[in-house]
Amino acid sequence: MERRGGFAERIPGRKLLFEVSGADGQTYCVKLKTKSKSKDPWQGSKKDGYPGANPEADAWVFIDNQADPADAPVAPADFMRNDIARELELWLQADPSRNADKNDHHKIDTFRVEDWAGRWDLIGLDFGSVDGS
């Protein structure tokens, strides 16, 4: 990130939220999701689909520790909130006895965010080629 003109710092007291200073001079709030195995989904919360969830977040960054970070999906926070809300609604419709508060775990498969691969520009960073890399 620093080689591309940016800087990230964890926001104290906020789980998985980072403040990113982009090369464009702007500051962004980013929700970070990581996974160790490419075949596994990222793990989120059903509550992330609630209206007003993570209002300070500008984007979500999905890091696969087995893949090139330049190709990591960087999705707008509104997209993720709407995507999770849609999936939550389908999950609840399939069985109305389900309770999102008791079963808050939510998987985010790669196909749901793959259209956002490499979109570091959304948080002011250029992960294109860098001389010497």
Image (spheres, grey):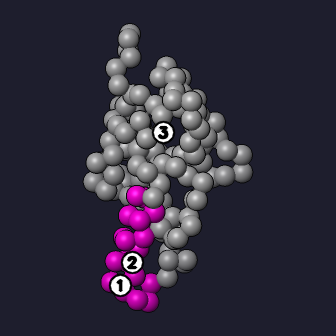
Q: Examine the rendered structure and indicate whether residue 96 appears above or below residue 49.
A: below
Q: Residues within 10 Å of mark 1 (few under 14, many from 20)?
A: few
Q: Taking 92 as reference, is 54 left or right?
A: right
Q: Which residue is mark 1?
A: 93
- Distance CA(mark 1)–CA(mark 2): 6 Å
Residue 123 numbered tag: 3
Outermost residue to the front: 25
* Span shown in magenta: 79-98
Q: What amino acid is labelled 2 in the image?
A: Glu
Residue visible at 43% across and 41% down?
Answer: 122
Q: Secondary structure at mark 1?
A: helix
Is residue 36 visible in the rendered structure shown here?
no
Picture quadrant of residue 132: top left
- Distance CA(mark 2)–CA(mark 3): 29 Å
Q: Is residue 125 magenta?
A: no
Picture quadrant of residue 70: top left
Q: Position of residue 98 (x, y in %)?
A: 44, 84
Q: Examine the rendered structure and indicate whether residue 96 appears above or below residue 101.
A: below
Q: Taking 5 as reference, is 114 left or right?
A: left
Q: Examine the rendered structure and indicate whether residue 130 appears above or below residue 100.
A: above
Q: Which residue is mark 2?
A: 89
Q: What amino acid is labelled 3 in the image?
A: Ile
**Which quarter shows the C terminus?**
top left
Q: Residues within 10 Å of mark 2 (few under 14, many from 20)?
A: some
Q: Main secondary structure of the magenta part?
A: helix
Q: Residues within 10 Å of mark 3 (few under 14, many from 20)?
A: many
Residue visible at 33% across and 46% down?
Answer: 116
